[in-house]
Image: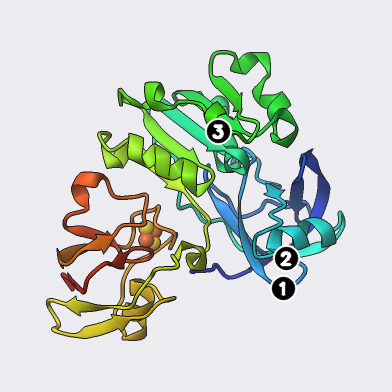
Amino acid sequence: MSIEALTQTLRITQKRPAADDIEFFELRRDDGADLPPFTAGAHITLRVPNGELRKYSLCNDPEERDRYCIAVKRDAIGRGGSVNLIDQAKEGDEIAVSEPRNDFELVSAQQYLFIAGGIGITPILSMIRHIRASGQGKFKLFYLSRSAETTAFLDELKAPEFRGMVTVHHDQGEIENALDLWPVLEKPGMAHLYCCGPRGLMQAVRDMTGHWSSARVHFEDFTPPGAMTKPDDVAFNVHLAKSGETYEVPVGKTILEVLREHGHEVASSCESGTCGSCRTKLVAGEVDHRDLALADYEKADNIMVCVSRGLTDITLDL
Ligand code: FES
């Protein structure tokens, strides 16, 4: 996974619960000076107390230049970074932080449709705050979570000024209580759709937006590359049509990693199959498309090499 350099040391100036198992952190410079700017949808990488690096979306208004705000969900079955940050980092501690980077950029539009699942609200909250502050466009938000107790920023989003713009839906963890998004997505209209949340939610939204222009559907996902593997993954060969080279892509490695190991420069950014940067022309072969960036009609001759794998040997236009 591409990781940004940690160029700043900031102070944790606030740490408080935002909901059950979600902690809010505010980070500032000691001298109160402006921080490197960010745009709505951006994230930072930080070093958690056990030394591991984690990415978190900024949830405050980008106009606020003197602080970064994040909200962290305790992921008890994750890799341990969020639990370590919540349990070990204290108000007053220093923390190493990268400059902000944005793989989920808010384009200029008249209408926006936001779908947030759980902690996926964080980049979308920054977008909403930016839209409210700038007066740029109209939006509707569908915010899906298990229960009121597990839902961060609920008071703010239920405030009267958001009436008619925000729908909060709790499913109590039961699939039969899930909100049916088809009526919302059936007619694309002119809105740009931004979706962030659990992979299952994003895949469902991707499946329901196959008839949308892919340029108007945007996803953000911090799933680590290792979590994209499947138990039945097998090695396959990738043949490069222009150079004539052939490499094996073993289980546990991505096509992108193998290409780079052999000196090929391939653009990438999110490396989780959402941003579209690593789109590569597919010449031949069957692909297990694991990205959220390609529309169905694009899959016959394109592949996102950061996450997708060959079901057979494949040939790329490289
Ligand atoms: S690097 Fe973002 S989709 Fe592959």
Say above or below: 90 vs 310: above
Secondary structure category for the residue under label 2: loop
Q: Is residue 260 visible?
A: yes
Front-most of residues 175 and 197: 175
Residue 76 x/y as whole percent: 71, 56
Q: CA distance from mark 3 to mark 2?
A: 28 Å
- Pointer 2 residue: 48
Front-most of residues 31 and 314: 314
Secondary structure category for the residue under label 3: helix
Residue located 68% across and 54% down the image: 75
Number of marks in picture = 3
Dot 1 amino acid type? Gly
Regarding ligand 1, which quadrant of the image does it lie in? bottom left
Check disc 1: other Cα within 10 Å, few if <14, some if 14-19, many if 20+. Answer: few
Name which quarter of the figure residue 64 lies in.
Answer: top right
- Say whether residue 110 is left or right of residue 117: left
For marks 3 and 2, give the one nearer the viewer: 2
Q: What is the number of the mark on residue 130? A: 3
Dot 3 amino acid type? His
Front-most of residues 214 and 60: 214
Secondary structure category for the residue under label 1: loop
Badge 2 vs badge 1, beta-carbon distance below 8 Å = yes
Residue 254 x/y as whole percent: 38, 72
- Pointer 1 residue: 51
Q: What is the number of the mark on residue 28? A: none
- Say whether residue 174 is left or right of residue 293: right
Say above or below: 270 vs 316: above
